[in-house]
Image (tube, rainbow, N blue to C red):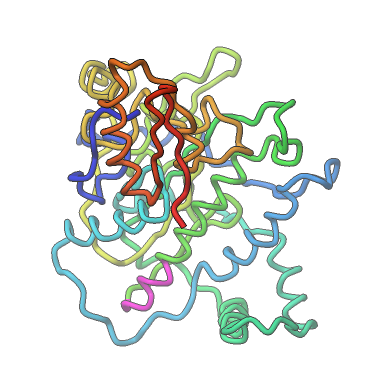
C-alpha cells in the first residue's frame, strides 16, 4: 500500500523524481557515448515470438514519422517552459517513464541514416492490396499512410530541438511463467515500439501546428538516439556491468533497462541539463528516504514495478492487487477506512466480515 499520494504532483514532472537528480551545465563528451545500435524485429528461428508481429506495426510508424507541415502556424504558447510542460505532459499521459528535452547537438546527426527495411514491403502491400475492413475512418488512415510513404524525403537541417521519450522495462518474464513463452526477450522491442508510438503522434501534432518535426526510432532515424538520451538528461555514460566490456547508458532509477524514441523539431522548447555521473549523484537526495517511500511521486523503491511480485497473466487491476485481506481485530477498522477510500475512487465495493476478520473486494456493477 502506498504511504504518500502524488495527486498534487504536476503532470509534466512524471512518475519518477527527476527533479531530484543532480545536473551539469557542461557539455557531455559525445565521443564517449556508445553508438546507437539499429533494432531488428525479425525472429526467424522463433516464429511464435511476439517480436515478429511487432515488425509490421513498427514499419507503419516509421513510414509516417515525417509528413506535410501545416503552412499556417497555429496559436500556441510562446513561453518555451510552457511548451515543454505541455509536451512532457502528453508523454506521461502515454505512459512514458521519463521525458527529456535538449537542443539538437551536431554530434547526434548520423552520417548515414538508419532505415527500416520493412517499409519497402509495407509500401508494396499498400500499392497492390485493397483494404477490406469496414472499420470507420480506415480509408482516411490508409490514405494518410500512402501519402506519407509517397512524399519526397526531406532533411532535418532546420531542426533545433529534440524531445526524447524513455520507456522502462518491467521485469523479465520467467521462463516457466504461465503465458510468457511467446514474449521472451522482447523487452527492447516493446520499449522501442511504445516510445515510437508516442514520438510519431507528437511529431504529427507539431507538424499540424506548423512546425517541421520528425520522429526517430531504433529502426529508422537520422539521429543517434543514445546521444539525444544523454543530451536530454535522461542518462549518463557509465562503465558497463561487470559481465560486459566498455561503457553503457545508465539512468539513476531504471539503470540500463529502457528504450527510447525521439522527435526532432523546429519547435523551440525549454531544455533539460545533462546528468552528472552516477558517482556524483547525491545518493541521499536521489535514492534516500523520499525515494524509498515515494514521497509525492508515483514511483518509488517500493512501487517501481507493479509486476515485481506478480505474474503478468494476473494483470494489475485494483481487485487483484488488494484481493482478500485477513486483519487482526486491532487494525481491521483502520485498514478498512483506508481501503474504502481507495476503492470508491476505483469503483470497487468492500464487504467486511468482522466476525471472520476478512474483507472481500468486488467490482461494482
Quadrant of the rendered image containing residue 2: top left
Point out the residue furthest to the front here.
355
Q: Is residue 254 left or right of residue 19?
A: right
Say above or below: 346 vs 169.
below
Question: In this orientation, does residue 32 appear?
Answer: no
97 or 43: which is nearer to us?
97
Rendered residue at 33%/28% (across/down): 300
- Range of magenta residues: 203-210
247 or 169: which is nearer to us?
169
Rendered residue at 31%/77% (across/down): 209
Point out the residue furthest to the top here.
242
Q: Position of residue 231 (x, y in %)?
A: 34, 42
Q: Position of residue 125 (x, y in %)?
A: 77, 75
Q: Is residue 44 left or right of residue 284?
A: right
81 or 3: which is nearer to us?
3
Say above or below: 322 vs 286.
below
Q: Is residue 359 left or right of residue 146?
A: left
Answer whether residue 208 is magenta in the image. yes
Rendered residue at 38%/72% (across/down): 205
Q: Position of residue 45 (x, y in %)?
A: 86, 41
Answer whether residue 85 is magenta in the image. no
Q: Position of residue 284 (x, y in %)?
A: 22, 16
Quadrant of the rendered image containing residue 24: top left
335 or 79: which is nearer to us?
335
Image quarter hosting the N terminus: top left
Amino acid at each position: 500500500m502506498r504511504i504518500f499520494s502524488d495527486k498534487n504532483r504536476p503532470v509534466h514532472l512524471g512518475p519518477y523524481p527527476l527533479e531530484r537528480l543532480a545536473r551539469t551545465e557542461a557539455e557531455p563528451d559525445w565521443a564517449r557515448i556508445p553508438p546507437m545500435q539499429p533494432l531488428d524485429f525479425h525472429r526467424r528461428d522463433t516464429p511464435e515470438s511476439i517480436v515478429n508481429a511487432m515488425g509490421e506495426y513498427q514499419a507503419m510508424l516509421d513510414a509516417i514519422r515525417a509528413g506535410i507541415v501545416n503552412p499556417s502556424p497555429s496559436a500556441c504558447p510562446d513561453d518555451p517552459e510552457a511548451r515543454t510542460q505541455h509536451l512532457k505532459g502528453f508523454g506521461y499521459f502515454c505512459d512514458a517513464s521519463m521525458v527529456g528535452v535538449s537542443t539538437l547537438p551536431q554530434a547526434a546527426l548520423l552520417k548515414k541514416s538508419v532505415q527500416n527495411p520493412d517499409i519497402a514491403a509495407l509500401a508494396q502491400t499498400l500499392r497492390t492490396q485493397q483494404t477490406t475492413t469496414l472499420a470507420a475512418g480506415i480509408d482516411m488512415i490508409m490514405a494518410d499512410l500512402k501519402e506519407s510513404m509517397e512524399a519526397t524525403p526531406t532533411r532535418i537541417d532546420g531542426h533545433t530541438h529534440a524531445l526524447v521519450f524513455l520507456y522502462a522495462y518491467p521485469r523479465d518474464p520467467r521462463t516457466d511463467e504461465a503465458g510468457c513463452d511467446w514474449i521472451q526477450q522482447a523487452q527492447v522491442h516493446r520499449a522501442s515500439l511504445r516510445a515510437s508510438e508516442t514520438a510519431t503522434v507528437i511529431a504529427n501534432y507539431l507538424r499540424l501546428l506548423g512546425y517541421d518535426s520528425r520522429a526517430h526510432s531504433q529502426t529508422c532515424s537520422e539521429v543517434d538516439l543514445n546521444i539525444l538520451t544523454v543530451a536530454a538528461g535522461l542518462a549518463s555514460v557509465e562503465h558497463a556491468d561487470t559481465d560486459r566490456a566498455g561503457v553503457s547508458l545508465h539512468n539513476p532509477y531504471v539503470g540500463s533497462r529502457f528504450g527510447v524514441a525521439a522527435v526532432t523539431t523546429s519547435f523551440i522548447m525549454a531544455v533539460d541539463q545533462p546528468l552528472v555521473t552516477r558517482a556524483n549523484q547525491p545518493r541521499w537526495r536521489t535514492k534516500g528516504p523520499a525515494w524509498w517511500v515515494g514521497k509525492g511521486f508515483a514511483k518509488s523503491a517500493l512501487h517501481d514495478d507493479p509486476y515485481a511480485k506478480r505474474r503478468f497473466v494476473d494483470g494489475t487491476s485494483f481487485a487483484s492487487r488488494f484481493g482478500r485481506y485477513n486483519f487482526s481485530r486491532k487494525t481491521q477498522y483502520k485498514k478498512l477506512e483506508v481501503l474504502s477510500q481507495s476503492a470508491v475512487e476505483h469503483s470497487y465495493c468492500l464487504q467486511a466480515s468482522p466476525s471472520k476478520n476478512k474483507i472481500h473486494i468486488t467490482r461494482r456493477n
